[in-house]
């Protein structure tokens, strides 16, 4: 792919972003007041391009601006890694959050018309991003390292494509279960999550409320089979049972399928 094709594709990739609405919010908040070079719009486009091209540092991002084609798109001729770092610290996160919410709403309007067998399935997961402890002391993680955890609720836009419907940020040390309240909240939906979200009390709440869920169990989980059903030989299902989960001291009161 040559550079002309690359930046033409990039333009189409960022086209759904409502630049006029973003600029209006930038003006209302005085985000670019006294800014002479790297505007918030240029910053957003530059870092989106860096994400798309998997750039690994500010120096590599700054080198992208050497392209004449990209200079026209951004409205600047050069930038230094130090300037990128300063801008990154000054940009108001709420502005970027508004861009995210607007894009999600656009996807929902389009995908809402599509018929998908997976439209009621929601995937809950998290990922940890390590940070420099000296600069991000608030982001508690380990003794020698800081970090944040991004908690995602992914939904299907079509039978194969997913997008993040909701995001929450915590310190990396925060347990995944602390975000179940905000991410799992729709009656009738089917939530799929990993063993980091295992919470027996929540499992009972979801069962009583009509919230469906599927989760991996921890290796030391105790189960007691009440009923076992026959599975057709050609089925991809390995077993079908109803169980009680947990011990008499700590257990799920409802009977669960497994």
Image: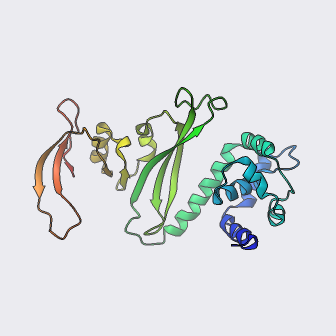
Q: Compare residues 79 and 24 and report the one nearer the observer.
A: 79
Q: Is residue 136 above or below residue 182?
A: above
Q: What residue do we see at 11% from left, 52% from top?
A: 227
Residue 149 appears left or right of 201: right
Q: Nearer the viewer, residue 103 or 12?
A: 12
The answer to whether residue 33 of the structure is visible from this angle is yes
Residue at left offset 73%, top offset 47%:
58
Q: Position of residue 254 (x, y in %)?
A: 21, 43
30 vs 73: above or below? above
Q: Residue at x 47, y 55 (%)?
A: 154
Residue 9, relative to residue 71: is it above or below?
below
Figure quadrant of the N terminus: bottom right
Q: Give how far across and how far down residue 141 sits, in percent.
A: 52, 31
Task: Specify whether 84 is left or right of 122.
Answer: right
- Residue 189, percent from left and from top: 37, 56
**By what rule are the colours in the image chosen?**
rainbow
Q: Residue at x 25, y 38 (%)?
A: 220
232 left or right of 78?
Answer: left
Q: Position of residue 201 (x, y in %)?
A: 30, 37
**In this rendering, would 222 be left or right of 119?**
left
Query: Does the image show residue 25?
Result: no
Q: Nearer the viewer, residue 129 or 20?
A: 129
């Amino acid at each position: 792919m040559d550079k002309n094709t690359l930046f033409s594709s990039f333009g189409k990739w960022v086209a759904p972003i409502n630049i006029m609405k973003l600029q209006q919010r930038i003006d209302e908040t005085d985000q670019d007041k006294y800014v002479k070079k790297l505007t918030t719009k240029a910053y957003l486009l530059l870092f989106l391009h860096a994400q798309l091209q998997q750039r690994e540092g500010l120096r590599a991002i700054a080198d992208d601006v050497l392209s004449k084609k990209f200079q026209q798109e951004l409205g600047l001729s050069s930038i230094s890694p130090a300037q990128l770092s300063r801008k990154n610290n000054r940009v108001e996160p709420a502005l970027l959050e508004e861009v995210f919410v607007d894009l999600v709403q656009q996807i929902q309007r389009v995908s809402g018309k599509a018929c998908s067998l997976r439209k009621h399935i929601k995937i809950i997961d998290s990922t940890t991003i390590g940070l420099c402890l000296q600069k991000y002391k608030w982001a508690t993680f380990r003794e020698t390292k800081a970090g944040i955890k991004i908690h995602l609720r992914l939904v299907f836009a079509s039978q194969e494509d997913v997008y993040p419907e909701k995001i929450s940020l915590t310190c990396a040390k925060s347990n995944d279960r602390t975000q179940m309240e905000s991410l799992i909240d729709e009656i009738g939906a089917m939530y799929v999550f990993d063993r980091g979200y295992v919470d027996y009390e929540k499992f009972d709440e979801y069962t009583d409320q009509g919230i469906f869920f599927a989760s991996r169990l921890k290796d030391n989980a105790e189960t007691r089979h009440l009923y076992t059903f026959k599975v057709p030989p050609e089925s991809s299902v390995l077993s079908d049972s109803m169980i009680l989960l947990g011990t008499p001291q700590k257990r799920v009161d409802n009977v669960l399928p497994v």
